[in-house]
């Protein structure tokens, strides 16, 4: 990464090479910052606190082809991470309601027509959710969400069917479809034992499979019993025991993090002049403009994070 050159942060994603921080360069070029153990992430945030920039929009040409377009003037985000103009151009705006409306551009229709998976994910405090993943994102979807334990519980021949099954699980079992990012981070600082989390997830998965096999399934789908395998490197975040939350707001100011492990969008990292490793959520940088350089984090007083 070039020092003293602005980058727009697109968020954390998991690739076959591991976790990366996605960036857009000054000319709109797509770049990646590897979040491997031993990496130093030193930057300052250029965006005004409380502001997020639009990340642009996507068009979908088919199952494996899509194009990403940057926002023309780095407008402030109005809906999630998009300005109104980019939201109106984004093919994925149809995705969350396509199973009810049936409305979507042809390329997105082709994307939805691939096989999909239903899963139950459990996080560090035992909170669980039901969710869906396309076959192409079967592994990465759960890795990026920061699941500690997860099991696939259903399969469907397309995305419309799987979304109906997801809604049915929520309606019949009360299992929600989202867990807040901030809650996941706090949970990682005081996680339940690994065996207890596995038991919680297993019990929830059994409930869902029984529901699907008990007459609440749909044609073109069936229940499955398959364990999701969490990245081995994430163990240092998920099972390290009580941790210390990073005491500074990542979305503002200057920071210097020495990353030792990553899990979802969360990292365990040290800072200069401190022996303590902190837990930080890099999703706080999404939609922010940053520049890299020889920056450091302020060292908090001992009592701020130990008592």
Image: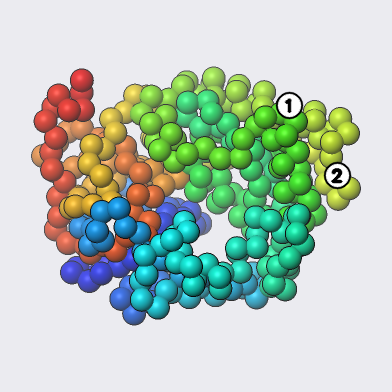
Give the secondary structure at mark 2.
loop
Q: Is residue 234 visible?
A: no
Residue at 83 percent of width and 46 percent of height = 221
Dot 2 and dot 1 residues touching (CB under 8 Å): no
The residue located at (37%, 70%) in the rendering is 75
- Give how far across and how far down residue 164 sits, in percent: 76, 46
Q: Residue 123 has which mark?
A: none
Measure the alpha-carbon separation of dots 2 and 1. Answer: 17 Å
Q: Quadrant of residue 249?
A: top left
The picture places residue 203, in percent across and down from the top left corner, at: 67, 23
The vertical placement of 231 against 101, above or below, is above
Callout 2 crowding tier (Cα within 10 Å): few <14, some 14–19, many ≥20: some
Residue at 47% of width from left, 59% of height from top? 79
- Which corner quadrant of the image does residue 48 belong to? bottom left
Residue 73 horizontal/vertical position (percent): 36, 76
Q: In which quadrant of the rendered image does the C terminus lie?
A: top left
Q: Quadrant of the image for the N terminus?
A: bottom left
* Image quadrant where residue 222 sits: top right
Using residue 35 as the reference point, say whether residue 62 is left or right of it: right
What secondary structure is marked by label 1? Answer: helix
Residue displayed at 65% across by 59% down: 95
Q: Is residue 139 left or right of residue 207?
A: left
Query: Mark on residue 207?
Result: 1
Q: Earlier in the sequence, mark 2 or mark 1?
A: 1
Q: Nearer the viewer, residue 42 or 166?
A: 166
* Above/below status of 134 relative to 196: below
In screen coordinates, is 109 left or right of 1?
right
Is residue 197 visible in the rendered image? The answer is: yes
Residue situated in front as seen by the camera: 271 or 299: 299
Question: Is 215 placed above or below 28 here?
Answer: above
**Residue that badge 2 annotates:** 218
Residue 211 image offset from top left, x and y in percent: 80, 30
């Amino acid at each position: 990464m070039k020092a003293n050159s602005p980058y727009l942060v697109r968020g954390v994603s998991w690739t076959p090479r591991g976790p990366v921080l996605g960036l857009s360069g000054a000319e709109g070029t797509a770049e990646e910052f590897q979040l491997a153990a031993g990496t130093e992430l030193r930057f300052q945030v250029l965006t005004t606190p409380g502001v997020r920039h639009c990340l642009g929009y996507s068009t979908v040409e088919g199952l494996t082809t899509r194009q990403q377009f940057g926002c023309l003037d780095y407008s402030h985000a109005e809906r999630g991470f998009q300005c109104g103009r980019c939201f109106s151009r984004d093919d994925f705006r149809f995705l969350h309601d396509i199973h009810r409306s049936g409305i979507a551009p042809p390329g997105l229709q082709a994307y939805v027509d691939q096989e999909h998976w239903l899963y139950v994910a459990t996080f560090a405090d035992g909170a669980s959710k039901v969710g869906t993943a396309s076959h192409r994102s079967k592994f990465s979807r759960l890795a990026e969400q920061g699941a500690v334990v997860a099991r696939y519980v259903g399969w469907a021949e397309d995305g419309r069917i799987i979304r109906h099954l997801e809604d049915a699980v929520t309606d019949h079992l009360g299992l929600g479809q989202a867990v807040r990012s901030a809650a996941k981070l706090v949970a990682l600082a005081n996680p339940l034992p690994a065996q207890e989390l596995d038991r919680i997830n297993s019990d929830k998965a059994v409930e869902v499979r029984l529901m699907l096999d008990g007459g609440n399934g749909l044609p073109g789908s069936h229940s499955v019993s398959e364990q999701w395998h969490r990245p081995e490197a994430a163990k240092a975040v998920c099972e390290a025991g009580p941790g210390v939350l990073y005491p500074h707001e990542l979305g503002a100011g200057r920071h210097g993090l020495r990353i030792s492990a990553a899990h979802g969008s969360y990292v365990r990292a040290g800072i200069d002049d401190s022996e303590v490793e902190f837990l930080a959520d890099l999703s706080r940088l999404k939609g922010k403009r940053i520049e890299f350089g020889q920056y450091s984090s302020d060292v908090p007083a001992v009592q701020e994070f130990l008592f």
